[in-house]
Amino acid sequence: MRIIVTGASGVLGSAIYAAYKSAGHTVLGLAHLRPTDELRQLDLLDSAEVERVFSEFKPDWVIHCAAERRPDVAEKDPEGARRLNAVLPAHLAQISKALKFTLVYISTDYVFDGTSPPYTPSALTNPVNLYGRTKRDGELAVLGVVGSKTVILRVPVLYGPAPKNSDSAVNILLDVVTDQSGKEYKMDHYATRYPTNVLDIADFLVRLSALPSSRPIPPILHYSGGEPFTKYEMCLVFARILGLPHKHIVADAEPPKGDAATTRPRDCQLYTRETEDLMEGYGSLGWTPFEEWWESYLKTKQ
């Protein structure tokens, strides 16, 4: 198959790009800010150039990972976040309709308000921050292009191999744990997250795109790790693995206060039974236990 991966220099995109390549597919990785010898630089907001590149490559599947994923940044530049997270996916869905490829739009658990988990794919969305609203609008935009083959894949907070810890809201907690300078950190112990490994998602997508046509894919799927953690609890895991003291990390169990940039839902657990049923006979969801993966990964980094 011929695959395009947008945002292929990011934590998720790079894992998906590598997984499709290792599975023997012809893959075009697109990056805007961090192109490499392997990845092609492309501004996805340049509509004409995007149409030209896609038409030339003739993909069977496009995995759209590129997004403004940082809630605080989205809040400061709402128009920029809307263009990336809602307007651009609609354009890709239009190209999907014209070129007959399957578009996978990577969305987020933050389309939900976190008040009544777990959330099924058909549950009503009600995002509490601007980032979630732009991703919800992206979902509605791609679903609204009649005749396109589109799959929305909602995922929670992600972790995995990353060029910089700051590339992931989970990986960056390592920097907090290893900072033994005496600085104190207040760490969220209010919101429950379900950290999910990008390598698991990449493996799942390779298997998803290989399903026979006799097994139709629903328009919305959920993929999630199964273990609940607050950010404070993730820090404790890292401290235990690294054998470091963690007195400088103080649990903050209060609901976040302040401007909209800090608004986070309490528990957006994604219900994954539909995804498990779809993949029956083609491998399980296959998520990796959080502490087990980090223990192995950090050993190789020492």
Image: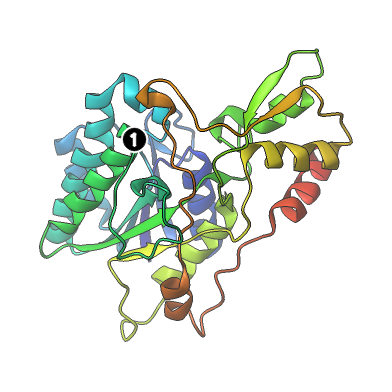
Q: Quadrant of the C terminus?
A: top right
Comparing 79 with 100, the one in front is 79
The image position of residue 275, as x and y in percent, is 44, 72
Q: Is residue 237 left or right of residue 201?
A: right
Q: Quadrant of the N terminus?
A: bottom left
Q: Residue furthest top?
A: 182
Q: Residue at 63% x, 48% y: name it.
A: 229
Q: Is residue 219 left or right of residue 164?
A: left
Q: Quadrant of residue 235?
A: top right
Q: Is residue 271 left or right of residue 159?
A: left
Q: Is residue 216 above or below residue 94?
A: below
Q: Is residue 287 above or below residue 216?
A: above
Comparing 247 with 213, the one in front is 247
The image position of residue 238, as x and y in percent, is 77, 39
Q: Residue furthest right?
A: 243
Mark 1 = which residue?
131
Residue 24 visible within the image: no
Q: Residue at 85% x, 37% y: name it.
A: 242
The image position of residue 202, as x and y in percent, is 51, 57
Comparing 13 with 246, the one in front is 246
Q: Quadrant of residue 191?
A: top right
Circle 1 Cα neighbour tier, 10 Å, few/some/many (<14 / 14–19 / ≥20): many
Residue 233 visible within the image: yes
